[in-house]
Amino acid sequence: MFSNIRRGSVFLAVVLLSMLALASASPTGASSHSSSLQDRFPSANFPIMGVTPEGFPIRAGGTEMHLIRTAPRVQRWITEEEVWELKRQRIGFIDVTFYPEYSEYEQ
């Protein structure tokens, strides 16, 4: 239980620091940092506010996102909570967040 609390606290701190850095970058809150993050995850259909220490993109509101593959050439972005729900339901998928081109190598 305490590890979940600690993990949540660290995650919240990372999100807040990321948002503070973005807000202080320019008067509008936009920065080249956010566009470089969008370049890093080109298939993301949401604005990326930062990344977790593990490298997963964070959308507005502090939600960690994962790009999963559920079938050949079928990929979608879901929240970390949805990842755990799929695991609880024993639904198979592959997390391809860092390898979005994975489906290109399928026969």
Image (cartoon, rainbow, N blue to C red):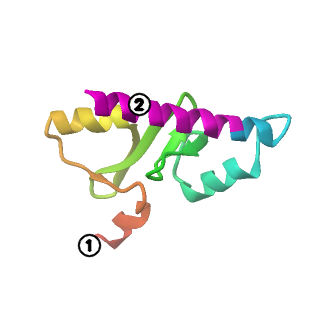
The residue closer to the viewer here, 2 or 41, is 2
| Callout 1 touching callout 2 (CB < 8 Å) | no
| Magenta-drawn stretch, dominant element (helix, strand or loop) | helix
In the picture, which quadrant includes the C terminus? bottom left
Judge left or right: residue 95 versus residue 41.
Answer: left
In this figure, which residue is indicated by the disc labeled 1? Answer: 107
Q: Position of residue 6 (x, y in %)?
A: 38, 32
Q: Which residue lies furthest to the right in this view?
A: 27
Residue 32: x percent and y percent? 75, 52
x 35%, y 64%: residue: 103
- Can residue 59 be seen at all in this image of the molecule? no
**Image quadrant containing the N terminus:** top left
Q: Nearer the viewer, residue 4 or 71?
A: 4
Residue 5 lies in the magenta-colored region: yes
Q: Quadrant of residue 84?
A: top left
> Dot 1: what SS?
loop
Give the residue number, with chain letter if any, for mark 2: 8
Q: What residue do we see at 39% from left, 38% from top? A: 78
Magenta residue span = 1-20
Q: Along the horizontal axis of the image, is 55 left or right of 107?
A: right
The amino acid on which the numbered mark 1 sits, given as a three-letter code, is: Gln
Looking at the rendered structure, the kind of residue marked 2 is Gly
